[in-house]
Amino acid sequence: MGPESLPTRVLTLVGLAGVGKSTIARGLGTLWGWDVWDLDRMIEARTGFTVTRIFQEQGEPAFRALERDALAEALAGERRIVATGGGAPADPGAMDAIVANSVSVWLRARPGLLARRLLADGGRPFVDGYDHDEAFAVLADQLARRKRHYERATFVIDVDDLEAPAAIEAIHALVGRQLAAP
C-alpha cells in the first residue's frame, strides 16, 4: 500500500479490552512523534469521572454518547493515533467513521488470553469478581457481537504472541513508513 492510497494520516486501533490498544498507541506516538488520542482517557479528563463510574452511575448509553463525541473529535485531525474503547466500533456509525477517516488496525487476540490479562491487571468492571471461565465467556460474547465491526478495519494484526514492542514494530512495518512520513 503506497502513501497515495492511504485516506488520512490518522491511525485508529480497535479490538477487545486488554488487547493493548492504549499501550501500543503510546508506543507508536513516541516512535512517530504523533499525538495519542485515547478515547477513555479523553472522556475521563472531560468528565472528571472514571469510565467505570460513568457506566455505574450514568449507564452505557450516556458513556457511548461521550465516546461518540470523543471519536468524532479524534478523527478530525492529522498525525494522531486513536485508541478506541473495545465497544466503540460497535456503536452505530462509529466503524463507518473510523473506516472513512483513518487507517485502522484490529488488534486481534484470543478471549482466553485477554481474560487472563484482564484478571491479572484488575480495574475492569465487566470482569471484576469473575473467575477465568466467567471472564472468558464475557469476552467471547463481546467478540461474537463486535467481530463484524472489527473485521472492517484496514488491517488485522494477531497479537496473541506479541508483546507491545513487537506489536508496535509490526504496525510500523505495515503502515508506519507511509503514515509517519513528513
Image (cartoon, rainbow, N blue to C red):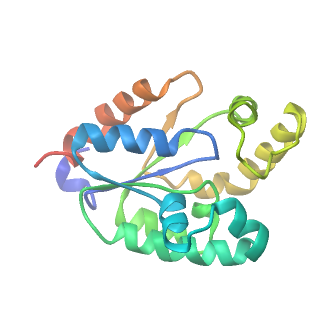
Q: Residue at x 70, y 60 (%)?
A: 52
Q: Is residue 44 left or right of residue 135?
A: left
- The correct choice, above or below, for 61 with respect to 26 in the image is below
* Tally of numbered discs: 0
In the image shown, does 137 or 36 lie closer to the viewer?
A: 36
- The correct choice, above or below, for 168 with respect to 67 in the image is above
In the image shown, does 144 or 47 lie closer to the viewer?
A: 47
Give the farthest residue toward the left.
182
Residue 60 x, y percent position in the rendering = 73, 71
Q: Is residue 148 left or right of residue 111?
A: left
Q: Is residue 154 visible?
A: yes
Q: Is residue 95 visible?
A: no
Q: Residue at x 40, y 26 (%)?
A: 165
Q: Is residue 67 left or right of residue 171?
A: right
Which quadrant of the rendered structure holds the N terminus? top left
Q: Is residue 143 left or right of residue 14?
A: right
Quarter-wise, where is residue 149 in the image?
bottom right
In the image shown, does 74 or 141 lie closer to the viewer?
A: 74
Residue 157 x, y percent position in the rendering = 48, 35
Q: Residue at x 67, y 78 (%)?
A: 62
Q: Residue at x 62, y 70 (%)?
A: 91
Give the farthest residue toward the front.
48
Residue 30 x, y percent position in the rendering = 28, 40
Residue 74 x, y percent position in the rendering = 38, 67
